[in-house]
Amino acid sequence: AQSVTQLDSHVSVSEGTPVLLRCNYSSSYSPSLFWYVQHPNKGLQLLLKYTSAATLVKGINGFEAEFKKSETSFHLTKPSAHMSDAAEYFCVVSSNFGNEKLTFGTGTRLTIIP
Amino acid sequence: DGGITQSPKYLFRKEGQNVTLSCEQNLNHDAMYWYRQDPGQGLRLIYYSQIVNDFQKGDIAEGYSVSREKKESFPLTVTSAQKNPTAFYLCASSPGLAGAKNIQYFGAGTRLSVL
């Protein structure tokens, strides 16, 4: 069984300040973890993925995430927020063994304050 | 351009009517998926297909049907049995079954509303 919990449904930050979107996961097997971004009325775009290689993963648009097995976390960060980062972000887990369906979190809406 | 095309962008359904959402991909991907997105609930898997002429139910298949007659096409029919069809529907594809090795790529979505 696998599940993912996004700890904040809504995060607001000022432009130029750091972004932190929190995600905890549960998986019976070694997991793969992903962050996707969705702009209003659009499909989802992959930001980054973790698949058991380096625990610090760099993605597009300056985002990165760190896999912490002891804390079962995969938080998404960015040093300096830009107005274009305003969107909904989804943390996603998949198992590396057996049925590899994706399980999506409920999303975090990121608002950027000018 | 390579990608996934969903049509129409907006769709309205009358009471008792079946409607079909189109999904076409030119990425030569084997696997295709349909998700439903409701506010505050993330994405839920409706159906998926690993290969032509084969498909499996996802977590919320009741009231929906699919076909996979061609590799590039995976249409979704929302039947009259689906009592709460208003949602944003997303189609995705991946080279193989999604997971560690196969990233899912998404279309732009179809927003379905009930008249």
Image (tube, coloured by chain):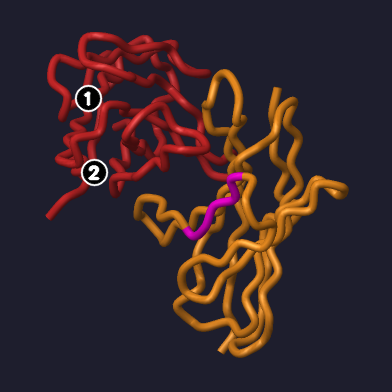
Please, is residue A16 above or below residue A61 in the view? below
The nearer-to-camera label among 1 and 2 is 1
Q: In this view, does A81 lie to the left or right of B64?
A: right
Q: Name the residue under label 1.
A: B74
Tell me, for residue A26, which label it has, or none.
none
At numbered mark 1, what does the secondary structure look like: helix, strand or loop?
A: loop
Rendering quarter of residue B76: top left
Mark 2: give few (<14), some (14-19) or many (20+) Cα within 10 Å.
Answer: few
| Label 1 chain ID | B
A93 or A69, which lies in front?
A69
| Quarter of the image where the N terminus of chain B is located | bottom left
Q: Give the range drawn in magenta.
A: A47-51
Q: What element carries label 2?
A: strand
Tell me the number on the disc at residue B10: 2
- Say whether disc 1 or disc 2 marks the residue closer to the N-terminus: 2
Residue A79: % across, % down: 65, 82
| Residue at the outermost right position | A70
Chain ID of residue with mark 2: B
Q: Which residue is drawn at 46% across and 38% down?
A: B101
What secondary structure is the stretch in magenta mostly built from? Answer: strand
Alpha-carbon span between mark 1 and mark 2:
18 Å
Q: Could you say which chain is coloured orange in the image?
A: A
- Quarter occupied by residue B25: top left
From the image, state the color of chain B.
Answer: red
Kind of residue at disc 1: Phe
Q: Position of residue B12 (x, y in %)?
A: 24, 34
Q: Can residue B17 be seen in this view?
A: no
